[in-house]
Amino acid sequence: MPFVLPSLTKGPIVIIPPAQLKQILSKPPSEIDALGPQTEEIQDPYTVRDKEIWINKLHLGVVRKQLTKDLPLLTENIAEELAIGFERHWGSPSKWKAVPAWDSVSKIVSQAANRVFVGIPLCRNEEFLEHSRLYSDSVFGGAVFISMFPSFMKPLVGWIVRHNLNRHLATCKKNRCLHRGREAAVESIEEREVRTYMGTPERRLAVDY
């Protein structure tokens, strides 16, 4: 049976039994708004620097239409990258080996995801992957922190979180980590465009859409 949990920052939260989820998910967007709660959960206005991303949300159309349709073409690449990632971080030891599970798995997932987003060789560039992973962790960690405060305090708390994110990016720029990653991304996209124009297209990536 559904029940309601009180919340100081988000209002009443309705808990739905698993048996009733299918009925809820089958309802049209006009009745069930998933985007609103998701936006509130990640605190877009305070954690995402580029307003075009959280205002226009162009990436949602890419994921729902193009990427979902081409998922069978991407699965093989993702599986290959997962295998490479596990071998890199876990190896194939013949004896028991201590593995930092959370840290290593997040790196493996980042590598597999970036195989779809940016492709080879950038998805195997450890410097790029580390920056991408740490930035994502900072965004989600900041969102959790912001969500702990009432709405009237979020602009101030968001400014503090954004200041920390900007400081993190500034440190990466100082070490030329972000600069080289951005240059490599642009170079990778341009190379793919040339190969496609010459009649040798590759499997699609998120940057192609």
Image (cartoon, helix red, strand yellow):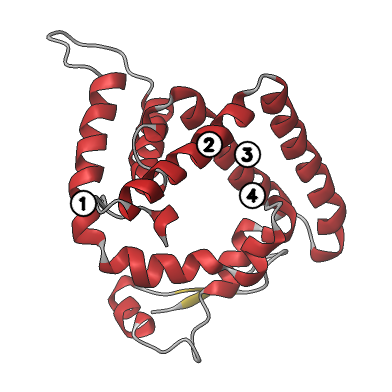
Lower sequence index among marks 1 and 2 = 1
On residue 75, the disc is 1
The residue lying toward the viewer, choosing from 187 and 182, is 187
Q: Nearer the viewer, mark 1 or mark 3?
A: 1
Disc 1 to disc 2, C-alpha distance: 21 Å
Local SS, label 1: helix
Earlier sequence position, callout 4 versus callout 1: 1
Query: Mark 4 packing: few (<14 Cα in 10 Å), some, or many (20+)?
Result: some
Query: Mark 2 to mark 4: distance in Å?
Result: 19 Å
Figure disc tally:
4
Mark 4 or 1: in front is: 1
The answer to whether residue 22 shows anywhere in this view is yes
Quarter of the C terminus within the rendering: bottom left
Q: Element type at marker 2?
A: helix
Amino acid at the residue labelled 3: Ser
C-alpha distance separating marks 4 and 1: 31 Å
What whole-number distance in Å separates the C-alpha atoms at marks 3 and 2? Answer: 10 Å
- Which picture quadrant has residue 134? top right
Tell me whether the residue at label 1 lies in contact with that at label 3, contact meaning CB atoms closer than 8 angstroms. no
Pointer 2 or 4: first along the chain: 2
Residue 50, x across and y down, in percent: 69, 55
Amino acid under disc 4: Val
| Circle 1 crowding by C-alpha within 10 Å: few under 14, some 14–19, many from 20 | few
